[in-house]
Image (cartoon, rainbow, N blue to C red):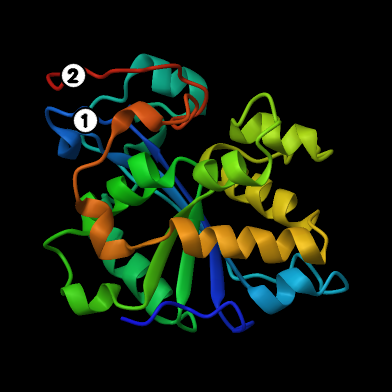
């Protein structure tokens, strides 16, 4: 498949995050379940146009009954408890909504997530694997903003999303979980000038993978500590 061109301002950029029952383990990554998800799409053109209305977006935010216990520390970090989600549909029941939403976005599509390669992209792939034809994933590329910020601003002391957001003058979003993470990434990118934005998208291409490839084995050692909402090195027992 052809790599999306930097000259294409029509590329759809989707800020993306998931919430989960805890951190994935090497032993059984599929045991971790998604509890919430957010997609915040825009285009390169809109990001380059500082006069564009930043609130004109079609956002998808969903919550799911994970049908398993949410780890206590994950609940403390996200504010989500099993009782809050007991009446929500399961992920499998809503998978079609997610696929239809992505299918209706203009291609090529670039998903952006902080610690995406080791967590957000991979967990979404594992949840969709076997439920939809592989052809539905064509034209979707993934770029991990944790890898990007390490090259974009190597002098930044902390590369955590919250700290990166604060470093550019970001204010509290008033949101929670994946919606908060997506909005913070949006806020960060909207502060970039033309040169920074061009470098950002160059790094997106240099670090990208196709969505189908995020299901391959990964190195968990390069993960941002706050990938499940501020948890440091959380390991979930697969029996929980």
Residue plotted at (18% across, 19% down)? 240
Query: Which residue is at the front of the view, 94 or 73?
Result: 73
Say if 108 sits above or below 94 in the image: below
Q: Is residue 33 left or right of residue 156?
A: left
Cβ atoms under marks 2 and 1 closer than 8 Å? yes
* Residue annotated with mark 1: 68
- The image position of residue 61, as x and y in percent, is 50, 55
Residue plotted at (26% across, 49% down)? 90
Query: Which residue is at the front of the view, 207 or 118?
Result: 207
Q: Is residue 29 left or right of residue 167?
A: left
* Residue annotated with mark 2: 240
Callout 1: few (<14), some (14-19), or many (20+) C-alpha neighbours within 10 Å?
few
Q: Is residue 135 left or right of residue 158?
A: left
Q: Is residue 48 left or right of residue 95?
A: right
- The image position of residue 181, as x and y in percent, is 58, 43
Callout 2: few (<14), some (14-19), or many (20+) C-alpha neighbours within 10 Å?
few
């Amino acid at each position: 498949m052809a790599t999306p061109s930097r000259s294409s301002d029509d590329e759809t950029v989707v800020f993306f995050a998931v919430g989960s029952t805890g951190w994935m383990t090497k032993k059984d990554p599929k045991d971790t379940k998604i509890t919430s998800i957010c997609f915040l799409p825009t285009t390169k053109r809109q990001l380059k146009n500082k006069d564009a209305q930043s609130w004109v977006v079609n956002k998808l935010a969903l919550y799911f009954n994970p049908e398993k216990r949410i780890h206590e520390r994950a609940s403390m970090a996200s504010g989500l408890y099993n009782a809050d989600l007991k009446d929500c549909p399961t992920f499998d029941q809503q998978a079609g909504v997610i696929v239809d939403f992505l299918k209706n976005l203009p291609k090529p599509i670039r998903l952006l997530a902080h610690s995406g390669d080791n967590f957000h992209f991979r967990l979404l792939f594992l949840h969709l694997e076997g439920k939809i034809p592989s052809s539905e994933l064509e034209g979707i590329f993934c770029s991990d903003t944790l890898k990007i910020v390490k090259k974009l601003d190597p002098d930044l002391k902390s590369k955590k999303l919250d700290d990166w957001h604060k470093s550019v003058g970001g204010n509290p979003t008033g949101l929670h979980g994946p919606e908060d993470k997506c909005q913070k990434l949006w806020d960060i990118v909207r502060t970039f000038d033309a040169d920074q934005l061009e470098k950002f998208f160059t790094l997106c291409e240099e670090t990208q993978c196709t969505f189908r490839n995020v299901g391959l084995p990964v190195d968990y050692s390069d993960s941002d500590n706050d990938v499940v909402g501020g948890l440091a090195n959380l390991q979930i027992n697969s029996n929980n």
